Image: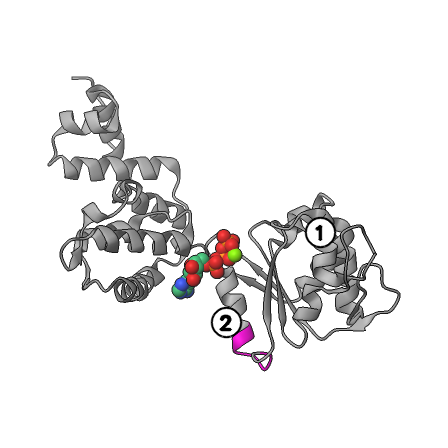
Amino acid sequence: MLITGESGTGKELVAKAIHYNSDRRDAPFVPVNCAAIPEQLLESELFGHMRGSFTDAKMDKRGLFEEAQKGTLFLDEISELPLMLQAKLLRAIQEREIRRVGATKSIPVDVRIIAATNLNLAEAVKHKRFREHFYYRLNVIELRLPPLRERREDIPILVDAFLKKCADSRGKQVKGLSESALAMLADYAWPGNVRELENVIERAVTLSHGDMIGADDLPVQVQGSRGDRRILDEAAEHTLPLHEVEKEYIVKILEKTGGNKYQAAHVLGIDRKTLYRKLAEIEGKPHSDA
Ligand SMILES: Nc1ncnc2c1ncn2[C@@H]1O[C@H](COP(=O)(O)OP(=O)(O)OP(=O)(O)O)[C@@H](O)[C@H]1O
Ligand SMILES: [Mg+2]
């Protein structure tokens, strides 16, 4: 099984949820970050080794595959796995047995493999950086976790959960967020996804004085996002052409400036003449310079 999604979308959390809700729950959940282990060590980490199989191998050692016996091996950042090990892993999955480095005999293993990546593996396959057969094997079931900006309806639920968690662990009484703070959270693009949201709430709980989190308790990049993002997200959602987006934006800014064209032109960064011309186009009137 393959879990895909941007960084911070909850891939590991989902992998754990699958493990602990399955009949493997009493056996270990073993996470391995393929990007964090040096390439020379990875094979022995995964498959184990026999004493004397290389200079530092003073004793026989079980690999993570054996540690995960009857349970789940979670291979995080699978795209970073060297091609040679991809082949070995595919073999292990297909044959249901592994061989420790330097061993002559195979050991049967019964392990569920869940892999995760924030890259497009199909692309990596095209460029021969990822083995096709291994990809198809993992991809039998693909679980795609959408970025937070594509499921904004989850934001209030997550905020509630993180507030409770933080307030409990810090013994702070925080009831909730002000309306403007909530609006900012709803509008922000969340490039770091759920992890970023969790950090923002933690920080806000720490900074807040009263029992409500206010806009001032949020990081500047979140405060700055107010409004503007929404328009763009909606425009993209409806695949609006550029001139439509421009039109809507001009109308919005005019509303904001109470119809003051001088101010509106200033905010939009265009001269007044250009604004008049654009407004005439919007209203479908022929434009005169008068
Ligand atoms: N639905 C959720 N409810 C509560 N917490 C969540 C949820 N999704 C993610 N989180 C939290 O967000 C953080 C990031 O999640 P996780 O580590 O699973 O992301 P990831 O997709 O593996 O990210 P990366 O690619 O950076 O490793 C964790 O602290 C996790 O507990
Ligand atoms: Mg992760």
* Residue 48 found in image quarter: bottom right
Query: Which residue sits furthest bottom?
Result: 23
Bounds of the magenta segment = 19-24
Name the residue rendered at 74%, 52% in the picture: 131
Q: Is residue 20 magenta?
A: yes
Residue 167, horizontal then vertical, whole percent: 25, 63
Q: Quadrant of the N terminus?
A: bottom right
The amino acid beneath tag 1 is Leu
Indicate which disc, 2 or 1, sits on the residue closer to the N terminus: 2
182 relative to 155 in the view: left or right = left
Q: Which mark is residue 41?
A: 1
Disc 2: CA contacts within 10 A as few (<14), some (14-19) or many (>=20): few
Q: Which residue is mark 2?
A: 17
274 relative to 105 in the view: left or right = left
Res 163 visible: yes
Query: Which residue sits furthest top?
Result: 290
Depth-wise, is mark 2 or mark 1 nearer the camera? 1
Disc 1: CA contacts within 10 A as few (<14), some (14-19) or many (>=20): few
Query: Which residue sits furthest front?
Result: 58
Residue 24, horizontal then vertical, whole percent: 60, 79
Q: Quadrant of the C terminus?
A: top left
Dot 1: element: helix
Mark 2 → mark 1, Cα distance in angstroms: 29 Å
Name the residue rendered at 27%, 67% in the picture: 168
Q: Is mark 2 within 8 Å of ligand 1?
A: no
Question: In the image, is residue 237 above or below residue 64?
Answer: above
